[in-house]
């Protein structure tokens, strides 16, 4: 038995060494074909990789809907030559070539044949996929999810630098900051803070999925002057029991899953939900979850809509 | 088997055809002539660099298609070969390579590894496959120990222990997945099968295992034939049954674990290909083993091509294709077999 | 020459064979009889290496049996089991060829010599014309003869047969046993055969061992062992033993009246 284990460890080590030293090891950065000049753009991305570009990218492929929205928002639309399956905003994005993305698999060959000079990845992508693109000699920038609104603003600037629209990005960030401040000012004077239940998925109505602490939904509800009843739970995307909802008895129910066929009328028919205050008061609102699930400029749109729903008396 | 050469020629032809298909078909169809030119250029680069378009094709071919083709072929051979060996060893037509826990163990290892943050280095990249491999091997070792009765391992015990341990591992895996919705999607994709790593790394990492494992199995053909008479008669005929059994389990498990660690859990190949070979060509394990390996490689390549093409640019997990094609085929095999008393 | 001394075989605390002493020289057919549970099959399985003895010794032609590897043992001892659930897909020829396993290398490569032995084994058991047929299509009698051929192909000097005539038509029963008789006379094999039918034992064996509850109650010629006293005691039923005219062999029947 000991001999067997020894041979096994030997074989595994050999295998690992072979694989690690095989020709296509990930390079720190694909070197440009010309002698590096002073105009070289250098970045460190979310995977701590060093990314260099000879010039702002002119042919960009986006691997996530949030990245697509950011690119369009900062005026880089003309440089986007391909996008993933789920990118559907703005409408013009749908006309761009689709390079896959559902089931977590991208059409690498199509990406390669479009000859991009930059691919912007997100946390939807794995390290394997980034390396696969590197092996094809394509420059990849991995844009991590921002933890909060300020982080999202920083991402906008980064994408602006990558695409040569830094000034526009900065202007956009200023505008967005002002809008956020406007919301904060308006609700600062209001004393009551309604309690909100944000529903993500109610396939099992006795244990629906909701957004917990650290999520954008939670943050935006707070900024809007509300209280997320799931904000004190322990994980970011928990299932909350109907009992807990009944105990917390929220003032308002927000249906983030409205796009999947849920409606206020349907909620009223659920067994056990009729006792909720929000149901009796008919305070069930539909909400476009894309506004808060994609870490891009539309987060602020989402914030404004949330604020109007939560404090209609302040936003006329 | 009357004509020994013909089955080998037929299956080899199938493999070669599938290899060509896999290398030619994709987002961009590379016609055979271009393939030929690219190969020549890859092996002996011309003085002038390739035109822009051809350079992209060359990259696609050598960095994507070729390694993928090699990986899929090896995986197909590994699964089919192991499946044949298990069906012979357990004398059970429903046996597949995942019978004693390889799939559930690999899944558990992979999902555990996915929740960790691996550094973006060569070795870090191998984190998930390595964890999957270790998970598979440890699970089989556990099943083996549980099934042991002093120095023998009765087949019934193996199957029962395999089922029990598999259920346990799957339950833990499900629990982990539910508790980290972020990784759930990635885990699901992995569990449905299909390679996530591209390039030559997986091919090189797999090569020692697949060669050793399949090489060992191919030599076990005669022993498997004798085992068909039952453990008692096999032993009375002079076969060292326990030693043979351990060797086959070791070789088949190692091979399957290696294949699964990079390709996820691809079902039906290990179950169906041995039956196909038995139906069309021979029940003699000395021939079934190599024929299954060749046919398995060819058939999985075809399934992989379909997975790429059927809903382009989306790519289906290849496990779905094998299940969709495999299930009705299996029923057909069952009907024919009942008429001909194959078991 | 097979020598068994003080053999004890059992499962844990429960002994199935108690201190068995037996000898079997070459050129002799030993019939083993006794009621169910007497330990007859256990004896066969212990000799062929399936069960390990708890104490006692087994020697054959000078070899200490428990120390042999399965391959070594199979060159000395061949077993003819009952013909049930043979793999149906193999041909008769391939099945008999399995008998050569102990003489082949681990890859199972056969030579012309092996094939000649198989051919002869099948000829002697009248199964050569079945060579290309699948075993699944053969009758019970044909399958049993194949198993005998397979054991012969093993070319082992000791043959163990565990109820080889069960489920066979009368003609095949007689046929098989006559072939065993001829083989033993011609080639000096040693044969230990477990049989249920006491009259077949009387007719075809040289010596008889009567086992009851794991003990050897009697050992001797058929005339000596197949007596009314011994048998009715062993089988817990009254019976009568007649003596056939010409041969003087015992013939066993239930009592008259």
Image (cartoon, coloured by chain):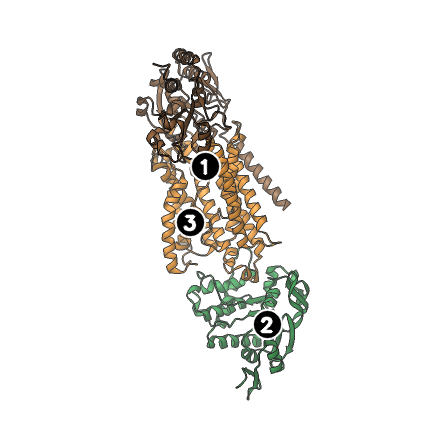
Q: State which chain disc 1 sits on.
A: B
Quadrant in which the C terminus of chain B is drawn: bottom left
| Residue A214, percent from left and from top | 48, 23
Q: Residues within 10 Å of mark 1 (few under 14, many from 20)?
A: many
Q: Which chain is brown?
A: A
Query: Which residue is labeled 3 in the image?
Result: B273
Q: Which chain is orange?
A: B
Q: Which chain is green?
A: C
Q: Is residue B67 above or below residue C95?
A: above
Q: Nearer the viewer, residue C37 or A33?
A: C37
Q: CA distance from mark 2 to mark 3?
A: 45 Å
The residue under the point 48% across, 22% down is A46
Q: Is residue B88 above or below residue A214?
A: below
Q: Nearer the viewer, residue A51 or A30?
A: A51
Q: Is residue C77 above or below residue A23?
A: below
**Secondary-structure class at tag 3:** helix
Q: Label for residue C192?
A: 2
**Secondary-structure class at tag 1:** helix
Q: CA distance from mark 2 to mark 1?
A: 60 Å
Query: Which residue is labeled 1 in the image?
Result: B190
């Amino acid at each position: 038995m000991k001999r067997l284990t020894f041979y096994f460890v030997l074989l595994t080590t050999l295998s690992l060494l072979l694989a690690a030293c095989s020709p296509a090891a990930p390079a720190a950065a694909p070197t440009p074909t010309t002698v590096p000049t002073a105009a070289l753009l250098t970045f460190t991305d979310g995977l701590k990789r060093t990314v260099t570009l000879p010039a702002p990218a002119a042919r960009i492929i986006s691997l996530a809907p949030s990245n697509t929205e950011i690119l369009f928002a900062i005026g880089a639309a003309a440089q986007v030559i391909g996008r993933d399956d789920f990118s559907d905003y703005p409408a013009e994005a749908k006309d761009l070539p689709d390079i896959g993305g559902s089931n977590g698999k991208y059409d690498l060959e199509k990406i390669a044949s479009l000859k991009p000079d930059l691919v912007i990845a997100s946390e939807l992508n794995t390290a394997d996929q980034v390396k696969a693109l590197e092996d094809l000699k394509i420059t990849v920038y991995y844009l991590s999810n921002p933890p909060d609104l300020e982080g999202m603003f920083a991402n906008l600037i980064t994408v602006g630098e990558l695409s040569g629209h830094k000034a526009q990005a900065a202007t956009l960030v200023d505008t967005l900051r002002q809008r956020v401040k406007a919301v904060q000012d308006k609700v600062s004077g209001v004393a009551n803070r309604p309690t909100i239940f944000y529903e993500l998925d109610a396939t099992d109505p006795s244990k629906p999925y909701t957004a917990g602490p650290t999520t954008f939904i939670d943050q935006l509800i707070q900024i809007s002057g509300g209280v997320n009843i799931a904000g004190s739970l322990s994980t970011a995307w928990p299932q909350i029991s109907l009992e807990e909802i009944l105990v917390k008895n929220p003032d308002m129910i927000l249906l983030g899953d409205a796009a999947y066929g849920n409606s206020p009328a349907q909620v009223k028919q659920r067994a056990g939900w009729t006792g909720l205050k929000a149901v009796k008061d008919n305070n069930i609102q539909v909400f476009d979850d894309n506004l808060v699930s994609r870490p891009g400029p539309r987060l602020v749109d989402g914030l404004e809509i949330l604020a109007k729903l939560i404090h209609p008396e302040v936003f006329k | 088997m009357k004509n020994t050469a013909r089955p080998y020629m037929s299956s080899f032809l199938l493999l070669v055809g599938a290899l060509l298909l896999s290398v030619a078909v994709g987002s961009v169809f590379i016609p055979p002539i271009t393939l030929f030119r690219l190969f020549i250029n890859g092996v002996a680069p011309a003085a002038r660099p390739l035109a822009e378009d051809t350079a992209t094709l060359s990259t696609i071919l050598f960095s994507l298609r070729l390694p993928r083709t090699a990986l899929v072929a090896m995986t197909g051979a590994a699964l089919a070969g192991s499946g044949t060996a298990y069906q012979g060893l357990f004398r059970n037509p429903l046996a597949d390579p995942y019978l004693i826990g390889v799939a559930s163990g690999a899944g558990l290892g992979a999902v555990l590894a996915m929740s960790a943050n691996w550094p973006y280095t060569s070795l870090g990249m191998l984190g998930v496959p390595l964890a999957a491999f270790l998970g598979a091997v440890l699970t089989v070792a556990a099943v083996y120990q549980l099934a042991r009765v002093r120095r023998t391992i009765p087949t019934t015990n193996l199957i029962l222990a395999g089922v029990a341990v598999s259920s346990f591992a799957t339950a833990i895996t499900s629990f982990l997945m539910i508790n980290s919705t972020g990784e759930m999607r990635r885990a699901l994709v992995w569990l449905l099968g299909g390679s996530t790593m591209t390039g030559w790394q997986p091919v090189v990492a797999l090569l020692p295992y697949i060669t050793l494992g399949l090489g060992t199995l191919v030599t076990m053909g005669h022993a498997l034939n004798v085992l068909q008479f039952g453990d008692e008669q096999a032993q009375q005929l002079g076969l060292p049954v326990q030693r043979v059994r351990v060797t086959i389990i070791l070789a088949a498990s190692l091979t399957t674990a290696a294949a699964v660690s990079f390709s996820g859990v691809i079902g039906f190949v290990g179950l169906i290909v041995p039956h196909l070979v038995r139906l069309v060509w021979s029940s003699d394990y000395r021939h079934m083993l190599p024929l299954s390996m060749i046919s398995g490689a060819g058939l999985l390549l075809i399934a992989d091509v379909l997975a790429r093409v059927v809903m382009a640019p989306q790519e289906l997990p290849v496990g779905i294709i094998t299940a969709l094609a495999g299930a009705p085929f299996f029923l057909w095999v069952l009907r024919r077999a009942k008429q001909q008393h194959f078991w | 020459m097979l020598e068994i001394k003080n053999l004890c075989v059992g499962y844990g605390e429960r002994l199935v064979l108690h201190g068995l002493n037996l000898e079997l020289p070459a050129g002799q057919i030993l019939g083993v009889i006794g009621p169910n549970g007497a330990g007859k099959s256990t004896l066969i399985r212990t000799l062929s290496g399936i069960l390990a003895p708890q104490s006692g010794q087994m020697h054959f032609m000078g070899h200490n049996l428990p120390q042999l590897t399965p391959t070594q043992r199979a060159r000395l001892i061949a077993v003819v089991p009952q013909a049930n659930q043979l793999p149906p897909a193999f041909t008769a020829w391939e099945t008999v060829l399995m008998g050569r396993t102990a003489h082949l290398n681990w890859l199972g490569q056969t030579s012309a010599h092996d094939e000649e032995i198989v051919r002869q084994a099948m000829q002697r058991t009248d199964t050569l014309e079945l060579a290309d047929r699948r075993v699944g299509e053969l009758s019970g009698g044909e399958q049993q003869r194949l198993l005998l051929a397979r054991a012969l192909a093993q070319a082992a000097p000791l043959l163990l047969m565990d109820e080889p005539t069960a489920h066979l038509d009368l003609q095949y029963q007689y046929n098989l046993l006559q072939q065993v008789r001829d083989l033993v006379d011609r080639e000096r094999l040693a044969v230990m055969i477990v049989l249920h039918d006491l009259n077949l034992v009387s007719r075809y064996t040289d010596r008889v061992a009567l086992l009851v509850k794991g003990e050897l109650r009697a050992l001797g010629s058929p005339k000596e062992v197949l007596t009314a006293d011994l048998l009715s005691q062993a089988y817990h039923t009254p019976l009568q033993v007649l003596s056939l005219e010409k041969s003087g062999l015992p013939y066993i029947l239930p009592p008259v009246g």
